[in-house]
Image (spheres, rainbow, N blue to C red):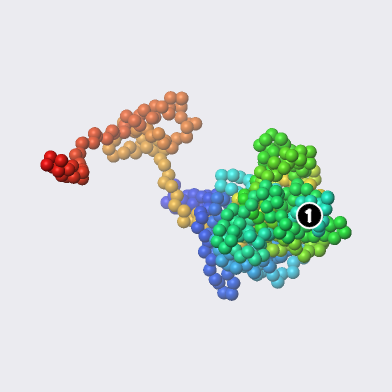
């Protein structure tokens, strides 16, 4: 081997570690440069493994409509540039999206090739998944269109509540435009006392009724449940007008998927699970539906938004969503505006179809059930057809995250120490330890570097263990040592004995 080969081999091994790296929890440093701010440093995502990939090697990259993705990304840039740097400094991408947004702002692209070139010039592609897994996971969501009424009637009996005034979240003002969808939520009693807020069963039983919190009324608790799961809805009133409602806050209890409960109880098979099947089962079993619904103690409050029928729902980024291009992600890990290329097959055409899905999408929303580095909820728009498509999505997909050029996806691997290469049994016999005579058999180790499938015979492992126990010296018996410390109570006992003797 040439003298330069060991060093070259070491560099190759180090780069190989960088191709699949579990990120640490340390934040990315954010520093000011010129008039703007951008993240500078290595890419580090908690609980994720990721590897750089060439754009040419991403299945379906060249055939996607990048112009649509560019328009969605450019719309997200309004929120990216308006966001405080401190709000995203602890996340992997930090404020690094500001630089590509600065470039995109004056661009007036109308050509798909130029849009694709923009992403290729200003981003690096990184295939990402949860640590120890190969694929990500997607579901779908939409904006329901449901019937309702401004007043309670014999038909419309289920209230849609706005946020109560006694709902309190630490670190947030009660007058904040919206509150987080995770973490503890309290009910304020008096001026100081805080207790957990009412759960779904208590609210359904009337814990907050009669306080003027009703935005409108729906036909059933099932309609309300699925509106809360989707996070928004268009309520069609009897006079033909429409109310638009969006997520405002929740009661602090973790979301429990009713579909998973039906699967665990062997009521609906996993491969047949869909939103439509859940709705049908609830309609056929009203008493069981009441019990099942209350297993999900989480409860969502809404606020009314002034949108026309032509406007799309507003996502957590505060911007209108784009059907087929917007996704909801884990906001504790990712930054709104991040592009993700999602690739695989989905039942778009029908429940049994395997429609190729290769699409660049933009993170613009979040949800309490969306947890993990490669987990997304795909937004399909409003109406019954969007509901049918999104309701049957529960599929593994490939995730590629686009990282701004200011972040280096393999920088951390360059400084990562590599373990020492363990010698094989052959080398160990050729170079025995100094305290071992030449020609003698070296002691076997229970942690031999030779794979188990290469050992001969079923007795190979027990023999190695026996040899290891015979070669290992036993510790000598520990001499008995009498403690030099005397019990403190003896002197006290002697004094007590003398007093009694008198």
Q: Residue at x 21, y 36 (%)?
A: 479
Residue in the foreground of this view, choosing between 476 and 232: 232
Q: Farthest residue in the right direction? A: 239
Q: Residue at x 72, y 36 (%)?
A: 268
In the rendered image, the quadrant that contains the C terminus is top left
**Up-down: is 491 above or below 77?**
above
Counting from the top left corner in percent of width and height, residue 297 is at: 65, 48
Residue in the foreground of this view, choosing between 414 and 317: 317
Residue in the foreground of this view, choosing between 153 and 325: 153
**Image side of residue 459 versus residue 230, left or right:** left
Residue in the foreground of this view, choosing between 294 and 38: 294
Counting from the top left corner in percent of width and height, residue 366 is at: 66, 56
Q: Farthest residue in the front direction? A: 502
**Image side of residue 367 versus residue 109, left or right:** left
Crowd tier of the residue under label 1, counting other residues whose Cα lies within 10 Å: few below 14, some 14–19, many 20 or above: many
Q: Which residue is mark 1?
A: 217
Counting from the top left corner in percent of width and height, residue 316 is at: 68, 60
Counting from the top left corner in percent of width and height, residue 355 is at: 76, 45
How many numbered marks have been drawn onto this rendered protein structure?
Answer: 1
**Up-down: is 192 above or below 491?**
below
Q: Farthest residue in the bottom direction? A: 35
Q: Residue at x 53, y 53 (%)?
A: 23
Q: Is residue 157 visible?
A: yes
Callout 1 secondary element: strand
Q: Is residue 54 visible?
A: no
Q: Farthest residue in the left direction? A: 502
Quarter-of-image position of residue 69 = bottom right
Quarter-of-image position of residue 185 = bottom right
Q: Residue at x 71, y 69 (%)?
A: 107
């Amino acid at each position: 081997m040439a003298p330069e080969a060991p060093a070259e081999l070491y560099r190759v091994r180090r780069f190989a570690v960088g191709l699949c790296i579990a990120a640490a929890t340390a934040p990315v440093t954010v520093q000011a440069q010129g008039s703007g701010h951008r993240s500078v440093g290595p890419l580090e995502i908690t609980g994720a493994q990721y590897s750089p990939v060439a754009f040419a090697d991403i299945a379906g990259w060249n055939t996607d409509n990048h112009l649509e993705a560019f328009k969605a990304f450019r719309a997200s840039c309004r929120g990216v540039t308006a966001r405080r740097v401190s709000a995203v400094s602890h996340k992997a991408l930090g404020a690094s999206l500001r630089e590509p947004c600065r470039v995109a702002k004056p661009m007036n692209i109308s050509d798909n090739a130029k849009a694709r070139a923009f992403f290729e010039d200003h981003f690096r592609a990184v295939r990402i998944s949860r640590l120890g897994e190969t694929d990500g996971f997607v579901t779908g969501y939409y904006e329901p269109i449901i019937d309702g009424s401004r007043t309670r009637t014999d038909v419309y009996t289920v209230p849609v509540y706005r946020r109560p005034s006694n709902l309190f979240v630490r670190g947030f003002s009660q007058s904040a435009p919206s509150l987080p969808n995770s973490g503890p939520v309290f009910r304020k009693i008096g001026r100081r006392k805080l207790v957990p807020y009412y759960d779904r069963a208590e609210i359904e039983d009337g814990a907050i009724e009669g306080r003027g919190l009703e935005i409108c009324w729906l036909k059933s608790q099932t309609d309300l449940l699925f509106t809360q799961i989707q996070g928004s809805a268009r309520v069609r009133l009897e006079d033909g007008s429409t109310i638009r409602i969006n997520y405002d806050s929740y009661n602090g209890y973790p979301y429990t998927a009713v579909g998973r409960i039906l699967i665990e109880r062997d009521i609906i098979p996993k491969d047949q699970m869909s939103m439509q099947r859940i709705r049908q089962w609830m309609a056929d079993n009203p008493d069981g539906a009441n019990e099942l619904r209350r297993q999900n103690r989480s409860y969502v409050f809404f606020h009314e938004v002034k949108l026309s029928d032509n406007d799309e729902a507003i996502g957590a980024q505060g911007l209108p969503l784009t059907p087929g291009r917007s996704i909801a992600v884990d906001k504790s890990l990712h930054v709104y505006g991040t592009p993700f290329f999602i690739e695989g097959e989905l039942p778009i055409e029908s429940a049994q179809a395997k429609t190729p899905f290769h699409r660049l999408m933009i993170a613009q929303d979040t949800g309490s059930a969306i947890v993990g580095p490669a987990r997304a909820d795909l937004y399909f728009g409003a109406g019954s057809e969007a509901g049918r498509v999104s309701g049957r999505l529960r599929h593994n997909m490939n995730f590629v995250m686009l990282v701004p050029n200011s972040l280096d996806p393999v920088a951390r691997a360059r400084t990562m120490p590599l373990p020492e290469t363990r010698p094989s049994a052959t080398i160990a016999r050729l170079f025995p330890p100094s305290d071992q005579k030449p020609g003698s058999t070296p002691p076997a180790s229970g942690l031999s570097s030779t794979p188990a499938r290469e050992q001969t015979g079923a007795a190979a492992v027990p023999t190695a263990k026996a040899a290891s126990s015979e070669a290992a010296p036993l510790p000598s018996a520990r001499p008995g040592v009498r403690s030099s410390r005397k019990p403190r109570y003896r002197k006290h006992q002697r004094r007590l004995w003398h007093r009694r003797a008198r």
